[in-house]
Image: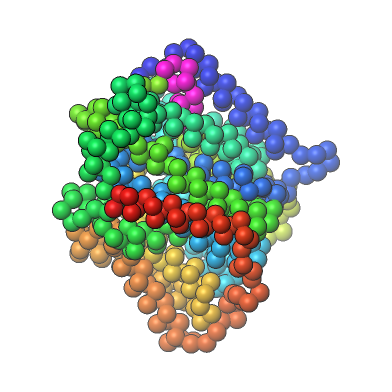
Amino acid sequence: MNLNSLDMAVFCLYGIALVFIAWWVSREKAGHQKNAEDYFLAGKSLPWWAIGASLIAANISAEQIIGMSGSGFAIGMAIASYEWMAAITLIIVGKYFLPIFLAKGIYTMPQFLEDRYDHRVRIIMAVFWLGVYILVNLTSILWLGALAINAITGFDMVYGLVFLAVFSIGYSIYGGMKAVALTDIIQVVLLVFGGFLVSYLALDKIAEGNGAWQGFSILLAEMPEKFDMILDESNPNYVSLPGLSVLLGGMWVMNFSYWGFNQYITQRALAAKSLAEAQKGIAFAAYLKLLMPIIVVVPGIAAAMLAPDLSKPDQAYPEMMKLVPHGLLGITFAALVAAIASSLGSMTNSISTIFTMDIYKQMINPNASDKKTVLIGRSVALLSMIIAVVVAKPLLGNLDQAFQYIQEFTGFFTPGIVVIFLLGFFWKKATASSALAAALGSFILSTLFYFLWPELPFMDRVGLVFILCAALAIAISLLTDGKDQEKAVDLQGIEFKTKTSFNIATVGVIMILIALYVAWW
């Protein structure tokens, strides 16, 4: 696929506009010095539409667009469960988790862990998250983004890595969370437009010019197996999506960890004007998640009909992009880069927030001024990106499936993290020692199951380890103390009642999900 001069002009215009808008929305009034709350939490001023759009822009990157489209090619619509189950997870997070975080007035997830447990839990988890965010998430987004650009344009991998790093830092490092969140509006508009365009053209191609709906009907009729939402054990892809575990098992643990207790995601909601505004943003993001399969999965299923002989499933999305005419191709390419850049900008901002607020301000310079704190945050964002560029190829260059690298590594720790937060929220007897035991037990148990029970599906392993870690944490709490903890969350003082608009949105999400799963069970 070749981008012509018109495509490149469109793409360059997008890049220039994004950097300018990021600078413009981040500017300060004369005489005002940007402080830590401004830089890391956008001055707690984000409106609902910015929160919802930024949540999706941070979430959707190359691994989702290329990887999930590839899974659509190989597996079918069943992979959409990752998106659709995330929608209901967001609603739960908005109603039950977010009120606790906002009531605590925290900047970071480790900060909450100190408020609820003790300083040891905060520092250990801060160091853990920094390692994962830099060496797993940031590195993977960069590498997979460069791979996507290489597949579409032939641009050399090294140049792709450097370009993505410089571009994302260029628009996010100065303004911090405000620049990231408000420019994500542009990113999401591009992402949705580009995704719908690719899906429309692919389906129209199937229908031989008779429209996308006709093409979708043909796809349903000729490839019905691609629309099985719940796979049975005879399906060769059962190990990836093990039947009802998708609805009732380990996926809930993975989703709660990602959407509820992940600094990279939750920081947007922490920056809201108010709890009600944050919940509206969460609901908006939930509806955007319902749309995502149309953008990232349908092109892959269409490719299974139009180009069934692709050597690798991950070639499906780039192959479908070939249907886009020049000019619009530039916009579609910009949408892909937008998804990658927004995820990179969001990740570096979260890394800088955790390091600055949980490590630097706690252990190095507790009395640092706001000016010094913001400077450290910017420096850490830049340094983390440099590290990710340097280690990307050594870590990921020899892997066939880089996305699997993310899932497998984080899956060793996810069950313990969810146990720590859920017990911290809703069980007053949970102790700091039980939290540390859950974190360590998650890694040990996951490792044992990985080597001793390799045929156990990844998702089932996550669910089983979660149950065992919860039992371990409860047992340790009861045996070592057995009484309500002084730092336990006082749920009586937290407002869990939601507004009518949020409740209506919740019913809408549930009804849509029921209809989708009933239709394609």
Q: Quadrant of residue 177?
A: top right
Q: Is residue 328 above or below residue 457?
A: above
Inspect the magenta stretch and tell me whether residue 334 lies in it.
Answer: yes
Q: Which residues are magenta?
A: 325-336
Residue 337 seen in this snapshot: no
Q: Position of residue 299 (x, y in %)?
A: 34, 33
Q: Is residue 296 above or below residue 240?
A: above
Q: For the view shown, which residue lies furthest in the left direction? A: 234
Protein image colouring: rainbow
Residue 12 seen in this snapshot: yes
Inspect the magenta stretch and tell me whether residue 47 lies in it.
Answer: no
Q: Tell me the chief SS of the magenta region.
A: helix
Q: Position of residue 446 (x, y in %)?
A: 30, 64
Left or right: 212, with 277 as reference point: left
Camera-side residue: 193 or 66? 193
Camera-side residue: 143 or 193? 193
Q: Quadrant of the N terminus?
A: top left
Left or right: 485, with 336 as reference point: right
Camera-side residue: 71 or 77? 77
Q: What residue sits 37% from the left and 32% below the top?
A: 213
Q: Quadrant of residue 74?
A: top left
Q: What residue sits 44% from the left and 32% below the top?
A: 196
Q: What residue sits 44% from the left and 13% below the top?
A: 4
Q: Position of residue 305 (x, y in %)?
A: 24, 31
Q: Position of residue 68 (x, y in %)?
A: 35, 41
Q: What residue sits 37% from the left and 77% below the top?
A: 471
